[in-house]
Amino acid sequence: TNLSAAVEIQGLQMRYSNGHQALAGVDLRVDSGQLVALVGANGAGKSTLLRCLIRLQEPTAGQARIGGAEVTGVGGRALRRIRRDVGFVFQRFNLVDRLSAFRNVVNGAVAREGTRCVVPALVPSEVRLEAMECLARVGLADLADRRVDRLSGGQQQRVAIARSLMQRPKLILADEPVASLDPVAGQGVMELLRDVATERGITVIAALHQVEFALEHTERIIGLKAGRIVLDQAASLTSAGDLAEFYGAGLE
Ligand code: ATP
């Protein structure tokens, strides 16, 4: 096993309780610092793969490692340690609506330290400073104090990215990070995700519906169909036409 692999997956299967086989044996290796797009029609298994990788869902078979550490079959403590290094950026942001952008970003540091709660008045100054730096990096320094439910979708997704940066992640898993955004905001968020990942050497695996985004902003395209990888190639060698089959049935 090469320890530089950010993610290694072997024979991963997921069968839901209704008998549906959402992952039918996935093998995948992603090197550190790679930007990978997971593409596939609705129901192909993209979300299930991301969720099983970090055991938000329990896979029914197979193994996964993140940064060389065993994810499958380990206890809660080891799992929490692994998750601390993994940032999640989801379609619906998963932010705390009532809290400011700043507070949401501070929560990323809480995840990092494994702390249960941080009293607002007692956020250490170095954490405040880092949170402001992360907000500035995503272009939101001016809106730090605004409640996130008063921000636009694109701004909220930037807060989610800033929060994941606060974790100082080695890996970011993004599940349709731009699906709920208009094309211009989506473009901006994809560029941001790509740029921060490149700057910081973060590995990114992003489930993406929009082929154009996958081709333009990632370096490797993995196509899923009925829970299997049926395409895996460099984005630079892939055309939109190559990906047509992944969108035929499932276009929203
Ligand atoms: P989408 O873009 O629609 O989210 P996806 O590629 O991410 O698609 P998944 O969400 O991983 O697909 O779903 C894969 C398959 O598993 C689908 O057929 C879905 O209906 C099914 N599935 C998902 N969650 C469950 C569940 N809790 N119980 C039963 N089947 C499920």
Image: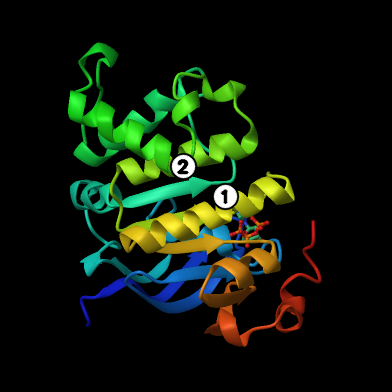
- Residue 179 locus on image (x, y percent): 67, 50
Residue 51 in view (yes/no): no
Quarter containing the N terminus: bottom left
- Residue 162 locus on image (x, y percent): 41, 40
* 220 relative to 130 in the view: left or right: right
Quarter containing the C terminus: bottom right
Q: Is residue 169 above or below residue 201?
A: above
Taking depth in this image into account, of 18 and 100 the one nearest to the observer is 100
**Quadrant of res 126:** top left
- Residue 230 locus on image (x, y percent): 60, 83
Q: Residues within 10 Å of mark 2 (few under 14, many from 20)?
A: many
* 70 relative to 183 in the view: left or right: left
Q: Residues within 10 Å of mark 1 (few under 14, many from 20)?
A: many
Label of residue 138 in the image:
2
Label 1 with label 2: CB-CB less than 8 Å: no
Q: Residue placed at 43% from the left, 72% from the top? A: 12
Residue hosting label 1: 189
Q: Is residue 105 above or below residue 64?
A: above
SS for dot 2:
loop
Q: Residue placed at 22% from the left, 82% from the top? A: 2
**Quadrant of res 225:** bottom right
Ligand 1, what quadrant?
bottom right
Q: Looking at numbered disc 1 in the image, what kind of residue is underneath it?
A: Val
Ligand 1 lies under 8 Å from the Cβ of mark 2: no
